[in-house]
Amino acid sequence: MPVTLSPGERELLETLVSKGLVSGWRMTTAELAERIGMDRSRVEALSRLLVEKGVFKLVEEEFLECRLTDEGRESLDKGLPEERLVKLLEERGGEAAIEEVRRELGSLYGPAIGNAARRGWVRIEAGRVKLLARGEAVDERRVLEEVARSGRIPPGLESVAKELARRKQIVCEKKRVAILEPTRPLDEVLREAVVEVGALTRELIESGAWRKVRLRRYNLKAEPPRRYPGRLHFYVEFLEMLRDVMREMGFVEYEGPLVELEFWNFDALYQAQDHPAREIHDTFRVEKPAAGDLPHEQLVEAVRRMHEKGWGYKWSRDIASRLVLRSHTTAVSARLLALRPKPPFRAFVLSRVYRPDVVDARHLPEFHQLDGIAVEEGMSFRGLLGLLKEIFERIGIRDVKFKPAYFPFTEPSAEVYVRIGGQWIEVAGSGMIRPEILEAFGVDAPVAAWGMGVERLAMALLGINDIRLLYARDVDYLRRFPVNWRLYTR
Ligand SMILES: N[C@@H](Cc1ccccc1)C(=O)O
């Protein structure tokens, strides 16, 4: 059966034949590459293909790879302990007192006597070591030399090597190599082969050679090389996707300060000054400076009146002036409402907020919220729920449900739950901004508002069970996330 050869395979075989390597050889791909002076990885790739085509056979072989220990190195330089004993006794005229030998050989004394006696070179008699034969460890020396040179054991000396390994002169490790050999003469293979070409060239057409060559089939299942171009972090992509959804619905993005007056974080939102959320364990308070400037007097007065009339206590400017790390992005919504926006006005804030939580799989002290307000004539609680449904639908979530809730700044209020992967999770708080606030600010259209926990939603949608992974920096982990092409192709 003639084989089909690619130009590369053909070149390898021609090189082998020209170097006389037609048949009867066995070599590793590394040896072969060196022998013919061809790039090793190319030889490897080509010979793998030729094995598949039955031109080469690949035989796995085990061999021992050895090296000298420190003791082995010393034996190679100065002789094995028993040889050194023989030399010592020769210098002493054939015998010496045990004490003297022990002193001369030190720690080698035991192995020297033991091995020399076993080989019949010495005998111990009346406290003296006597030389019987002028022995030399010829085979051992050959093994040590070859191991030092090539790491291999000379053929036929395996049992000597084993003994040297037992004596800790050498250490050996079993290794595997794949050895290549031709299955039949390569010149014959070449003569019968059909040449396969990867591209139909002008030359092939003009010369008519296209009639004889075989055109390589496209392999449509071959994996292309993977490329990892620079891209946004997947969580940033997620945040951008949310921004897009909001913009598509006519909301404009705003931002406010991260270090915020309690006035905007709480007071303007009708949250009483003794409200538990204002405690130090629920909100980060800033120490230096501890307080900031309140906004214009008219607004401060209106907020004071709202608190004192509604909640019936003495409102404190000092508390309202304290600085905190904002605990919700609704603080920015409050700032926007105080600007008395003319309806229709749709705004959102997607940014960082802070709460003193201990870091674990579900909590970070810094996280994101998405707050939105819609200031519109005719806006209603129903309209708010519809807005929320639409937002989630645009994110790809169809199952949304609402539960009555309480927030100091909205009435009525609802918690928002969505179903992702069979689980209902609470993702947002929402409601109609209270008339007391609208009156204090001088806004005369109804305002729908909500605040959404972004990390939670991302975790559920991306199937991540540890919030910290949203901030992962490990490139291998990040690459697992498919690119959101929608973001890059607009
Ligand atoms: N700010 C609220 C959510 C909310 C925003 C706007 C209206 C109603 C509720 C929270 O952090 O839980």
Image (tube, rainbow, N blue to C red):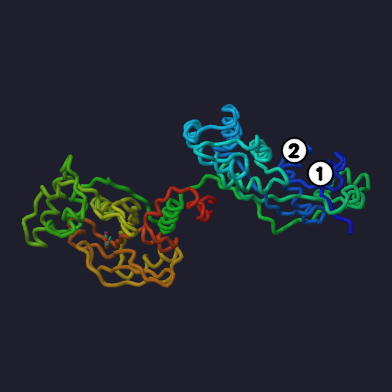
Q: Which residue is at the far front? A: 126
Q: Residue at x 37, y 71 (%)?
A: 424
Considering the numbered disc 2 on the image, is that residue within a helix, a strand or a loop? helix
Amino acid at circle 2: Glu
Amino acid at circle 1: Leu
Q: Residue at x 66, y 52 (%)?
A: 224
Q: Position of residue 31 (x, y in %)?
A: 74, 42
Query: Mark 1, mark 2: which one is toward the viewer?
Result: 2
Q: Which residue is at the far left? A: 314
Q: Position of residue 465 (x, y in %)?
A: 40, 61
Q: Quadrant of residue 138?
A: top right
Q: Residue at x 89, y 59 (%)?
A: 1
The dot on residue 34 is 2
Q: Position of residue 300 (x, y in %)?
A: 14, 49
The dot on residue 12 is 1
Q: Residue at x 45, y 61 (%)?
A: 462
Mark 1 burial class by Cα count in 10 Å: few <14, some 14-19, many 20+: some
Within 8 Å: ligand 1 and the Cβ of disc 2? Answer: no
Q: Is residue 440 left or right of residue 106?
A: left
Q: Position of residue 265 (x, y in %)?
A: 21, 52
Q: On screen, 11 above or below 54?
A: above
Q: Is residue 428 left or right of residue 43?
A: left
Q: Quadrant of residue 434?
A: bottom left
Q: Disc 1 or 2, which lies upstream in sequence?
A: 1
Q: Which of 464/27 is in front? A: 27
